[in-house]
């Protein structure tokens, strides 16, 4: 399948899609499991939350989220990959709280409900900046007033100041757009999109951040 964004790392080939969870474990040197659990704990999920998971992938993160929800809590996962859809639905074949929608998140879309939280994990950095703005608009439009947009991704940092080994790994595995992402002021970007208060949690020596932005 031809990539829409040739310089992006978020459009995955069939092999990576099929083995995505294992690849993430290796690429993060085994640290992904630990910090993703901590990050989701920091989202302050309530038992009856309705949560929209943008670029949900295999449902690995949604599975952790589901443990915080009671029977009235819900997760809708959105992704465009048929392989991700297969794995997501396999994980949640007996859980009516979890729904998969085959939909691009980089184009405007409308679901017939609003959510307490919108979550996106290591996806938004992989788009050109003008496309990121569409993703942000989709998140804002689907949040309830006071709802939180939870972005788990790289923090803002000076790559030149990174230790050599981290800088080498980042340059090796990350796409062109990630280098742009870490240089931008994301609170300012989100303020301009209509979000107000912010909360931050940092992981992996502060190179990764959960940024929670609240809809006015």
Image (tube, helix red, strand yellow):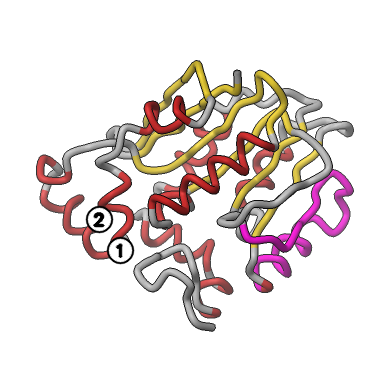
The image's mark for residue 170 is 2
Q: Is residue 202 magenta?
A: no
Q: Residue at x 31, y 60 (%)?
A: 174
Residue 23: x and y in percent read 45, 65
Q: Which residues are magenta?
A: 83-104
Q: Please tell me whether mark 1 sits on a helix, a strand or a loop.
A: helix
- Alpha carbon separation for disc pair 1 and 2: 6 Å
- Compared with 16, 199 (above or below) is above
Q: Residue at x 37, y 60 (%)?
A: 27
- Compared with 136, 179 (above or below) is below
Quadrant in the picture for the C terminus: top right
Query: Where is mark 1, residue-wise?
Result: 173
Q: Determine the image quadrant of residue 50.
A: top right
Structural crowding at the residue carrying mark 2, measured as other residues with C-alpha within 10 Å and reported as few (<14), some (14–19) or many (≥20): some
- Compared with 196, 129 (above or below) is below
Q: Is residue 88 magenta?
A: yes
Along the line of sight, the residue nearer the viewer: 89 or 213: 213
Structural crowding at the residue carrying mark 1, measured as other residues with C-alpha within 10 Å and reported as few (<14), some (14–19) or many (≥20): few
Q: Residue at x 88, y 31 (%)?
A: 72
Residue 116: x and y in percent read 71, 28
Residue 68: x and y in percent read 72, 31
């Amino acid at each position: 399948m031809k990539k829409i964004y040739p310089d992006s790392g978020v459009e995955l080939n069939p092999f990576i899609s099929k083995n995505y969870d294992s690849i993430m474990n290796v690429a993060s040197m085994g640290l992904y499991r630990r910090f993703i659990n901590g990050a989701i704990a920091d989202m302050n999920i309530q038992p009856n939350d309705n949560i929209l998971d943008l670029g949900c992938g295999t449902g690995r993160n949604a599975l952790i989220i589901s443990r915080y929800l009671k029977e009235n809590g819900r997760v809708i996962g959105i992704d465009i990959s048929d392989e991700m859809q297969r794995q997501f639905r396999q994980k949640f074949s007996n859980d009516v709280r979890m729904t998969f929608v085959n939909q691009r998140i980089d184009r405007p879309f409308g679901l017939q409900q609003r959510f307490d939280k919108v979550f996106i994990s290591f996806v938004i950095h992989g788009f050109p900046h003008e496309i990121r703005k569409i993703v942000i608009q989709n998140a804002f439009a689907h949040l309830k007033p006071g709802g939180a947009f939870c972005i788990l991704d790289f923090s803002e940092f000076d790559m030149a100041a990174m230790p050599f080994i981290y800088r080498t790994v980042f340059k090796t595995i990350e796409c062109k757009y990630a280098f742009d992402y870490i240089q931008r002021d994301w609170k300012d970007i989100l303020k301009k999109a209509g979000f107000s208060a912010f909360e931050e949690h940092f992981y992996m020596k502060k190179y990764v951040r959960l940024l929670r932005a609240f809809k006015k």
